[in-house]
């Protein structure tokens, strides 16, 4: 019988191609939106390491302070953590990230790599496509194992997939590394949405970083992954970590006092893209769920109207022996078949989801690799959503139509008119559509206004016209003795370029990352409270940095050339000055950083250091002349188009050292654009969803009002014959339609207030009850709904009186 119902449903849909196409497209929009968002969640949150890694028993371990989670682990602390394994976790592995210079004919190539502990591939369960992967022997002696594993994509792109690459030598940052293997095709690294080129042992860190990162217990730079023991969970792991953290604090108080260790499920990692994307995807998931509900309500109204014309058919089936359950089954099969067609569109849309998400992301220096698409999880999710949508949109029409009897079917087929009250079910669906459309539009309005408010936020620096580029002196063999004079030459050459107004060097540009580096400090005259966080975010900058970026120095001065000799100076942010020198000037205050005492010579205005939405926080600027790092950013303020100075800047760089190419050249505007990535994504998608929802609600209202006019033709004819004017009839139709709209708006405003409260944390500079967003969107829905009512009202004005009176 089910097959017979399916064949019958197919014949009905083929017989009405226009209805089938419109219904499929409408339902496809709702299912596709849900499939696309879920494919992003699957690729970036649920399965960020790809199918090659079993992530079910993976956890993340971070260092915590009194006020922050997600701090990095030092290498000595990692070794102690690994030595304690065997209880709640089987093993722990660590990784770091670094930009690298690959020596090549004709110049160096910028690539990105990860530094892995020797057991990382084994912990993840990744196999080699060629050769071998790391073993624990590759991670024993600092600097003693210059071996490299290539990612499969890099192997294909750079070496054309040659098997002979195993055993070849690559020069990374000027040092030869032997290729020992190629990773499995699906493995791209250990960070969501990023695809790395090479993997090297963590004990080779000195090749990629100037300072000793392996022996410094106070220098956190590694992320830790843990494989839980069978049957043990994160709470058990946390208990063991608390004990270990206490031991570390007692044994090494200088580096670990006030710090702890905290475990997270892998998908809840407090670092990287997952932390930023989780709340945004939660908002989008809720919104597309509302959109699908609205789509189902819209189609349910169409199916109700369609079922009303099939009462004769259904009554005859009932008379021939079909019971109510049998009739419901037949109608449900038709609606589920429609949903299956819409689900097919959803799968097609999900196959393009990676490209769609990448289109919102501005150019980045780090390798973006979004592999969202149709995995088995996405396909299964789309199937479940399609079946649920089919049942949801078909249950009401099926229930109502199955109540038909032979007598009512024949009467209605003969033309017995329906009254306004008999259409309450369809009217209720219209009210729901108007309410949901308003919720979606209010949400869109809030995020659009939030995006505008975010763009008006002051990042703390005034330069908008300029260039940011990267250069790494370590790759050319520069140590601190040679590097500092090279910095001076580079600044002199850059400032001489035509069109450059100011130039400076910095360890990182503002708004580079929400995980900015930090260091523990000691403040002269300040006794830390128990558990007080004394880790301060910092940047290493050259003289001229504040002038180049137009960062106001509100007290004292910025760094000067004379600071290259003598005690190291320090510039602090306003928040840091208020915290450690309350009620007095911070100038002259002394701060111990990395074993050196510095003296505060200036206080800079607070800025946005990691993201545009962060709260003011203590921050300090260290002079590059005393806190050397070889990989720096060149920051230029230009008088004209920024890109026009790039060729001359490369020539100037070659005059300093031809072996030092510039990497990751971008404009300051492009650099800032990434800070608005999520605002743009949310605002754009919500505007699209809100527009679709409003259109669907208008179509649903139009359908109900048009059907009402058709069903009340005789009544309207009687009213006209008794002296009612055409304007009175039109007003009656519009009034009935707007009464539905008014109820929908009232319900929608209440729902919108609740939804806005839930998304409060994602709004910047806008109240969740912003009057502008509510008034504008309510007016939009009311205007569109009025137009939807005017068309049926106009039809009522054109009725032929005699024809209307003859209608039974």
Image: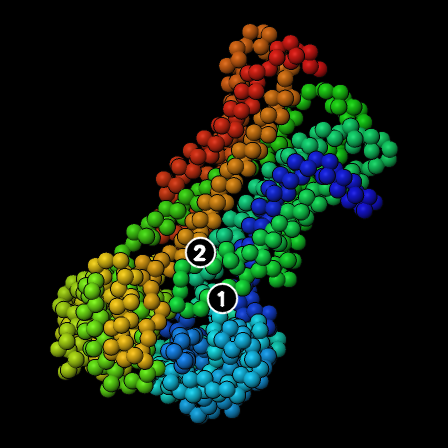
Q: Residue at x 35, y 82 (%)?
A: 475
Q: How many numbered discs?
A: 2
Pick whichever of labels 2 and 1 is earlier in the sequence: 2
Residue at image position (14%, 69%) is: 557
Of all residues shown, which one is farthest toward the right? 320
Residue where numbered disc 1 is placed: 369
Kindly give the residue lying farthest to the front in the view shown: 106
- Position of 632 relative to 799 (above/below): below
Marks 2 and 1 sit apart, C-alpha to C-alpha, by 13 Å
Q: Residue at the spot x=72%, y=41% of the render?
A: 334
Quadrant of residue 445 in the image? top left
x, y percent for residue 141: 44, 92
The reply, left or right, for residue 553 in relation to residue 111 is left
Q: Would you say residue 178 is visible in this rendering?
A: yes
Can you tell which mark lies on residue 750? none
Pick whichever, 458 or 180, lies toward us: 180
Identify the image quadrant of residue 113. bottom left
Q: Are marks 2 and 1 in contact (CB under 8 Å)?
A: no
The residue tagged 2 is 360
């Amino acid at each position: 019988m089910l097959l017979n119902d399916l064949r019958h449903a197919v014949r009905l849909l083929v017989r009405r191609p226009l209805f089938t196409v419109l219904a499929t497209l409408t339902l496809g929009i709702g299912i596709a939106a849900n499939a696309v968002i879920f494919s992003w969640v699957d690729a970036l949150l649920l399965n960020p390491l790809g199918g090659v890694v079993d992530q079910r028993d993976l956890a993340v371990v971070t260092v915590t302070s009194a006020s922050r989670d997600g701090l990095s682990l030092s290498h000595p602390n990692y070794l102690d953590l690994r030595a304690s394994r065997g209880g709640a976790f089987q093993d722990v592995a660590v990784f770091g990230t670094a930009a690298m210079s690959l020596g090549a004919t004709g110049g160096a190539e910028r690539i990105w790599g990860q530094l892995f502990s020797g057991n990382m591939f084994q912990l993840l369960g990744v196999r080699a496509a060629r050769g071998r992967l790391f073993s624990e022997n590759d991670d024993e002696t600092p600097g003693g194992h210059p071996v490299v594993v290539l990612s499969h994509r890099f192997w294909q792109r750079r070496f054309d997939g040659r098997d002979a690459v195993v055993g070849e030598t690559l020069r990374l940052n000027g040092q030869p590394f032997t290729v020992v293997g190629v990773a499995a095709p699906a493995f791209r690294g250990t960070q969501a949405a990023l695809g790395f080129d090479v993997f090297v042992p963590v004990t080779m860190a000195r090749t990629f970083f100037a300072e000793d990162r392996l022996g410094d217990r106070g220098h956190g730079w590694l992320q830790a992954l843990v494989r839980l023991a069978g049957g043990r969970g994160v709470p058990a792991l946390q208990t063991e970590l608390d004990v270990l953290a206490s031991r570390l604090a007692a044994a090494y108080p200088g580096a670990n006092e006030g710090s702890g260790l905290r475990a997270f499920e892998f998908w809840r990692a407090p670092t990287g893209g997952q932390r930023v994307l989780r709340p945004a995807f939660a908002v989008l998931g809720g919104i597309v769920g509302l959109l699908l509900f609205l789509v189902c309500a819209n189609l349910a109204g169409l199916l109700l109207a369609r079922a009303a014309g099939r009462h004769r058919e259904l009554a005859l089936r009932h008379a021939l022996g079909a019971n109510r359950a049998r009739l419901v089954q037949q109608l449900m099969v038709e609606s589920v078949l429609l949903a299956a067609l819409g689900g097919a569109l959803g799968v097609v849309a999900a196959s393009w989801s990676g490209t769609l998400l990448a289109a919102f992301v501005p150019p980045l220096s780090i390798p973006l690799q979004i592999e969202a698409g149709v995995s088995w999880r996405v396909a299964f999710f789309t199937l479940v959503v399609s079946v649920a949508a089919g049942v949801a949109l078909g249950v009401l029409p099926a229930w109502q139509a199955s109540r038909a009897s032979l007598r009512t079917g024949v009467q209605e087929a003969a033309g017995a008119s329906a009254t306004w009250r008999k259409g309450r079910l369809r009217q209720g669906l219209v009210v729901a559509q108007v309410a949901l459309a308003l919720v979606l539009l209010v949400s869109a309005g809030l995020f659009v206004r939030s995006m505008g408010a975010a763009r008006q936020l002051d990042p703390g620096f005034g330069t908008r016209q300029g260039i940011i580029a990267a250069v790494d002196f370590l790759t050319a063999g520069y140590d601190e003795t040679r590097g500092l004079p090279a910095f001076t030459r580079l600044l002199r050459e850059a400032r001489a370029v035509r069109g450059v107004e100011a130039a400076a060097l910095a360890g990182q540009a503002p708004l580079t990352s929400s995980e900015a580096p930090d260091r523990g400090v000691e403040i002269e005259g300040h006794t830390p409270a128990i558990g007080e966080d004394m880790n301060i975010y910092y940047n290493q900058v050259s003289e001229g940095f504040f002038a180049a970026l137009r960062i106001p120095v509100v007290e004292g001065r910025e760094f000067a050339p004379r600071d290259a000799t003598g005690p190291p100076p320090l510039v602090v942010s306003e928040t840091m000055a208020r915290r450690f020198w309350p009620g007095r000037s911070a100038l002259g205050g002394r701060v111990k950083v990395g074993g050196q005492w510095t003296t505060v010579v200036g206080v800079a205005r607070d800025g946005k250091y990691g993201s545009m939405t962060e709260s003011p926080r203590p921050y300090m600027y260290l002079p590059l002349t005393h806190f050397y790092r070889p990989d720096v950013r060149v920051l230029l303020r230009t008088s004209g188009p920024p890109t026009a100075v790039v060729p001359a800047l490369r020539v100037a760089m070659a005059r300093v050292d031809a072996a030092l190419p510039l990497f990751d050249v971008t404009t300051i505007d492009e650099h800032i654009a990434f800070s608005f990535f999520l605002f743009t994504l949310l605002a754009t998608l919500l505007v699209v969803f809100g527009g679709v929802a409003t259109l669907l609600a208008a179509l649903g209202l139009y359908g109900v009002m048009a059907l009402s006019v058709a069903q009340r033709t005789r009544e309207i004819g009687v009213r006209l014959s008794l002296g009612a004017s055409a304007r009175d009839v039109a007003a009656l139709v519009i009034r009935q339609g707007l009464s539905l709209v008014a109820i929908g708006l009232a319900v929608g405003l209440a729902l919108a207030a609740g939804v806005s409260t839930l998304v409060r944390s994602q709004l910047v500079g806008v109240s969740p009850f912003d009057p502008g967003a509510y008034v504008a969107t309510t007016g939009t829905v009311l205007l569109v709904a009025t137009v939807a009512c005017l068309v049926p009202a106009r039809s009522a004005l054109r009725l032929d009186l005699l024809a209307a009176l003859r209608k039974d």
